[in-house]
Every structure is written in C-alpha cells, then in structure tokens.
Amino acid sequence: MPNSFYNSPAGPLFISASDSGVTEIKFVNQTDQLTNEEAEIGAIIKDCIAQLEEYFSGHRKIFSVKLDPQGTPFQKEVWKQLQEIPFGKTMSYLELAKLLGDAKKIRAVGGANGKNPIAIIVPCHRVIGSDGSLIGYAGGMDKKRWLLKFEGSIQPDLFP
C-alpha cells in the first residue's frame, strides 16, 4: 500500500491508502521521515494531500477524497456519521449515540471514535463531552484543541 508523510500546520501526518481509498491518516512525531517519492505515492494520496492543503489554507470545509477505512460495521457506521458533523461545529458523544439510534451506545460510540483511522477527514476531533469539555483524541489533546480552534469551534482563549 502506498503511504506518505505530510507536514501539516497541526503537525506531521502519516497517510496510507489502498487502491480503493485512504486507509489511514494519523499524527506522528517523526518529522525527520517527512520525505516522499512523488512517483510512488499514488493518485489517491496526492489527492488527499491536495485536499488537506486546501483545508489548512481555509479553502476546503468538506473532503471528497476516496476513503477505505478498515473496521467493524458499527465502527464504519460511526465514522460515516462523524463525516456529517459540519466544519466549525461540535457534537457530544451522547448526541452522536442518539443519532445512531441508541443513547445507551455512548461507550461504544466513544470506542469507535477512538479507533477512527482517518484523522481530520473523518473529523473525530469534533466530538466533545456533553458538558462541552475536550476529552479524548488519539492524536493528542493539543492537536484536538488546535483543530477546533482552527475551525472556529472553540474560542481561542478557551482551553489554553
């Protein structure tokens, strides 16, 4: 599977894809590995990077790159619902569970959210606690805070 690194304003990202779409985007700490061979990364990753650049430059709010996340049917259902949360908005885990038909699934929704393999494009960073608190993010709370501030979802001086 082709893969690449992208040095985003929020931090370095590792991107991987299958022939069907992006399979993974995750934050990494290994900035020294941020080199790519253009011919080897493939059209899907090139499109993904182009769309991420548009997002970070403020010109894209909705992604259209092909996705191919690997997970259980329930996880995929949660990840699909995450993509419905608009840019600049947030939703609680409880609200997400209710949208999926059962408030009692809040823990399962949280677990699926935490296993989201495609950061930013499948915007799990937009899910917050019912009390408005920033809780849990596989990329790290500093990344979640940065993304939400960037999207205008939280006040810049809130959650320093």
Image (cartoon, helix red, strand yellow):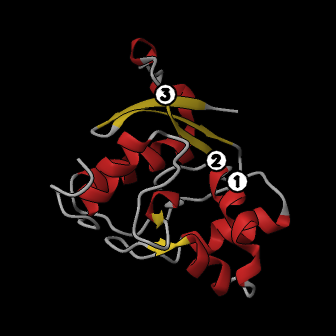
Q: Residue furthest left?
A: 157
For marks 1 and 2 on the same chain, the one whose residue lies earlier in the sequence: 1
Q: CA distance from mark 3 to mark 1?
A: 18 Å
Percent x, y of residue 4: 52, 29
Q: Residue at x 21, y 59 (%)?
A: 58
Question: In the rendered image of this protein, does residue 131 appear above or below residue 56?
Answer: below
Q: Which mark is residue 28?
A: 3
Tell me the quarter of the image containing the N terminus. Answer: top right
Q: Earlier in the sequence, mark 3 or mark 1?
A: 3
* Residue 17: % across, % down: 64, 42
What kind of residue is marked 2? Pro
Residue type for callout 1: Pro
Asked if labels 2 and 1 touch by Cβ distance under 8 angstroms, the answer is yes
The residue depicted at 41 percent of the width and 72 percent of the height is: 90
Label 2 SS: loop
Mark 3 or mark 1, whichever is nearer to me: 3
Relative vertical location of residue 99 with respect to residue 153 in this rendering, above or below: below
Answer few, some or many: residues within 10 Å of disc 2's Cα (few below 14, many 20 plus, some between 14 and 19): many
Local crowd size for mark 3, using a 10 Å CA cut-off: few (<14), some (14–19), many (≥20): some
Q: Which residue is mark 1?
A: 69
Which residue is nearer to you in this view: 150 or 23?
A: 150
Q: Which residue is mark 2?
A: 117
Looking at the image, which residue is at 84% across and 66% down? 73
Q: In the image shown, does 66 or 69 lie closer to the viewer?
A: 69
| Residue 45 in the image, given as x and y percentages of width and height | 52, 42
Q: Nearer the viewer, residue 44 or 103?
A: 103
How far separated are the C-alphas under marks 1 and 2?
A: 7 Å
**Residue sitting at 32 percent across and 58 percent down?**
148
**Residue kind at label 3, given as amino acid type:** Val
In three-dimensional space, the C-alpha distance between marks 3 and 2, rounded to whole angstroms, equals 13 Å
Query: Left or right: where does residue 143 sit relative to residue 25?
Result: left
